[in-house]
Amino acid sequence: MFIQLISLSLQSIGKSLNSPWAVKLLILVSSFALAACLPVANAENSSAELPLIVDPVSLPSPVLMRPEQTETSIAPTALPPTPVATATEPPPVAPRSHYTLDATLNYELRQLQVTQTVDYLNDTATPLQELVLVVDANQTNNVFFLQNFDTTANGATASATLNGRYLSVTLTETLAVGARVQFSLSYLLALPAEQSSLGYWRQTNMGDWYPYVAAYDAENGWILDYPGQVGEHQTYPIANYDVSLSIENTVDDLVIAASAKPYKQTDGTYFYTHANARNFAFSISPEYATKSVTVDDIIVTSYYYPGYETAGAAALEATANALTLFGETYGAYPHDALDIVIADFGDGLEYDGLYFLGESYYRTYGGNSLGFLTMIAVHETAHQWWYGLVANNQAQDPWLDEAFAIYAEYLYYERFEPDWVDWWWRFRVDRHAATGNVDSTVGQFTNRRPYINAVYLRGVQFLHEVRLSIGAEAFADFSRTYLQTYQGEIVTPDDFWDHLAAYTTEAEISRWQAEYFSSQ
Ligand SMILES: [Zn+2]
């Protein structure tokens, strides 16, 4: 996730960067801007601290479809012009936990009725007597309504208790390592009218909308971090998804962006499969225009609002280039599609197979790569590797994805904009006070700037120093083999250090740990 709250246009500044005074001006002006990561729920708190923000009231007025607006024209069987993948059947999938989500969206009411089946594979190293599901949708009142939990599916589940954002499931028998248990539940989601990843405004967003079984750590048990005041907090186990989405009480021209392309479509219903993935997200709007390109058989689609054709195309191009570069550098992108979705909320936010990119980036796009639209598009694309393929505990070890994602920006500029690499360092890193420990947790911060300075900026300085020390070729090999070793897993800092140890000396590692890290 990445955030940028500047509302100044960088266009004129970027065009005149050849003169030294302009560079100074840029540094001065951009010192008021802030690039950071935070949960969407905290956007209001944080933006109050900043002199220059994207003011929600300056956005074009959204047309809200509130529940009481029952007279709106309705086309029950409208077929959204959503791109459909050419595959007609789901691909074969590896043995994983499996989620089947049958969802019906009442578009007029913005309510989602879901029947969910979980086929959980105990891929931990521990026999389990209970399961804990993360229900982020229930962290605020009146959004998630559990209707039924089927404890009789195969006699294996005894009871289920929903307590805030956690659903505890007691098993009738201990679930052995490698064994499976199935259960189902149904619930209603009443999406709030807010500019967030789970809510609606100009767009209807469904991110983190369903309960999933938490990741499990052999030492500490279930990984159940609460949202912090900065950053993200979830730890996503990898799983397979089958999702159907039906839309009732719809409007004309709805367009659906999702973590995967539908492999089948019938009247008003879309069928998706998403294998070996961290999550499944949707975003729907009647206002989306789209542009697509195919990169090595991957369909990349940019969803944007009318008026942002140039920026929407630029986000698409940056993402396509980044997919190519990171595919070569790290390893193959694992899915057959990636969606870029303009966001009503600020910042960038990654999901597996889809990422959001704040509208402010489109508005301030200056016609070239020198700005946040390109940087954050590249950053969120990099999260498809460092978050998607190799996951981590985002609350406790955020550097394990964020430092890699921001360093991927540097690699992008080095490849595609070599004349602007120095600019990238100045703009992105050097103008801020990069201080703090790379291995800080999100819970250590109450606002974003110090968090970004520590985890991202010290993180990118650290990774760059590693690359300079071991050489670009060895660093590329380290990145590739690290990905190969840990893809599908949830890495820990120990995994990182163990892997790096093969590429450098103990003395170098000790020196880096002393300089950049707190707890090694
Ligand atoms: Zn990020």
Image: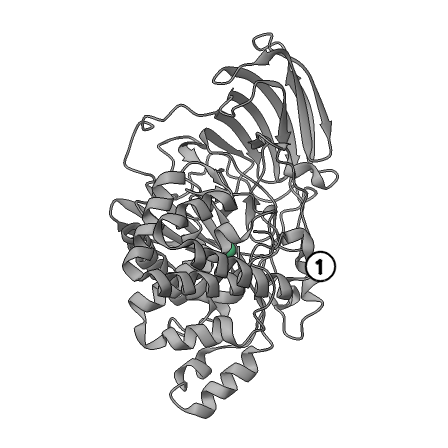
Q: Residues within 10 Å of mark 1 (few under 14, many from 20)?
A: some
Q: Position of residue 95 (x, y in %)?
A: 40, 23
Tell me the kind of residue under disc 1.
Answer: Thr
Q: Secondary structure at mark 1?
A: loop
Residue 158 is left or right of residue 498, and the answer is right
On screen, residue 219 above or below 69: above
Residue depicted at x 28% and y 54%: 324
Question: Does the image show residue 59?
Answer: yes
Q: Nearer the viewer, residue 8 or 388?
A: 388
Residue depicted at x 50% and y 31%: 246
Residue depicted at x 47% and y 25%: 98
Q: Which residue appears farthest toward the top when viewing the image?
A: 155
Q: Position of residue 148 (x, y in %)?
A: 66, 20
How many marks can you see?
1
Badge 1 is on which residue?
A: 446
Q: Position of residue 470 (x, y in %)?
A: 34, 60
Which quadrant of the figure has residue 216? top right
On screen, residue 82 above or below 458: above
Q: Position of residue 185 (x, y in %)?
A: 61, 21
Residue 326 is left or right of residue 348, and the answer is left
Residue 130 is left or right of residue 255, and the answer is right
* Visual colour scheme: one colour
Question: Does the image show residue 83?
Answer: no
Q: Nearer the viewer, residue 116 or 34?
A: 34
Q: Nearer the viewer, residue 309 or 403?
A: 403
